[in-house]
Image (cartoon, helix red, strand yellow):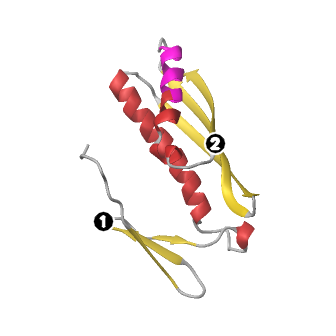
């Protein structure tokens, strides 16, 4: 890992109508539009969906780092995140994220250590640590067959 601070730069370009194009160095462009809740087409990534996706992605990447550091063997982690957007004191903002995580460990695996690693991943996720909305983790550990 590189020393801190890290700098991430993304450019966005859009006209009066149509998609917004997001680009970053060495990354493929992403076409975005408002979600259906804001009158958008519903067939593109939106800023809201990208934020919720960032929470899910960061959770899994954080878990990978913890599992690697603690030598926890595992098979698969599935993560579904729901983000609640609401109005608070006349300001539209995300008020919470609910992370549903299902981890599959190998037979004979340490399920207690696995659950602790999931909880730790939720605590260290840099995306959720950068947001003011509350995060609730609902974790399940299953043994792979």
Residue 144 visible within the image: no
Secondary structure at numbered mark 1 = loop
Residue farthest to the top? Answer: 108
Looking at the image, residue 28 sits to the left or right of residue 77; the answer is left
Residue positioned 43% across, 37% down in the render: 62
- Dot 1 alpha-carbon crowd within 10 angstroms: few under 14, some 14 to 19, many 20 or more: few
Q: CA distance from mark 2 to mark 1?
A: 33 Å
| In the depicted structure, whether residue 70 falls above or below residue 28 | above
Residue positioned 60% across, 86% down in the render: 17
Residue identifier under label 1: 26
Looking at the image, residue 71 sits to the left or right of residue 128; the answer is left
Residue 37 x, y percent position in the rendering: 74, 67
Residue positioned 60% across, 59% down in the render: 49
Residue identifier under label 2: 134
Q: Is residue 112 magenta?
A: yes
Q: Nearer the viewer, residue 9 or 115?
A: 9
Residue positioned 59% across, 66% down in the render: 46
Residue 101 x, y percent position in the rendering: 59, 34
Residue 41 placement: quadrant? bottom right
Residue 92 visible within the image: yes
| In the depicted structure, whether residue 46 falls above or below residue 59 | below
Secondary structure at numbered mark 2 = strand
Quarter of the image with the C terminus in it? top right
Residues shaded magenta? 110-119
């Amino acid at each position: 890992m590189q020393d801190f601070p890290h700098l991430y730069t993304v450019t966005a370009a859009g006209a009066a109508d149509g998609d917004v194009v997001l680009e970053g160095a060495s990354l493929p462009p992403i076409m975005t539009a408002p979600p259906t809740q804001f009158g958008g087409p519903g067939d593109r990534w939106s800023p809201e969906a990208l934020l919720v996706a960032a929470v899910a992605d960061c959770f899994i990447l954080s878990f990978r780092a913890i599992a690697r550091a603690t030598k926890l063997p595992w098979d698969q982690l599935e993560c579904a995140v729901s983000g609640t957007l609401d109005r608070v004191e006349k300001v539209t903002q995300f008020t919470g994220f609910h992370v549903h995580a299902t981890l599959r460990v190998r037979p004979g695996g340490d399920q207690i250590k696995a659950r602790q690693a999931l909880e730790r991943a939720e605590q260290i996720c840099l995306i959720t640590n950068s947001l003011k909305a509350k995060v609730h983790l609902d974790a399940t550990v299953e043994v792979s067959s």
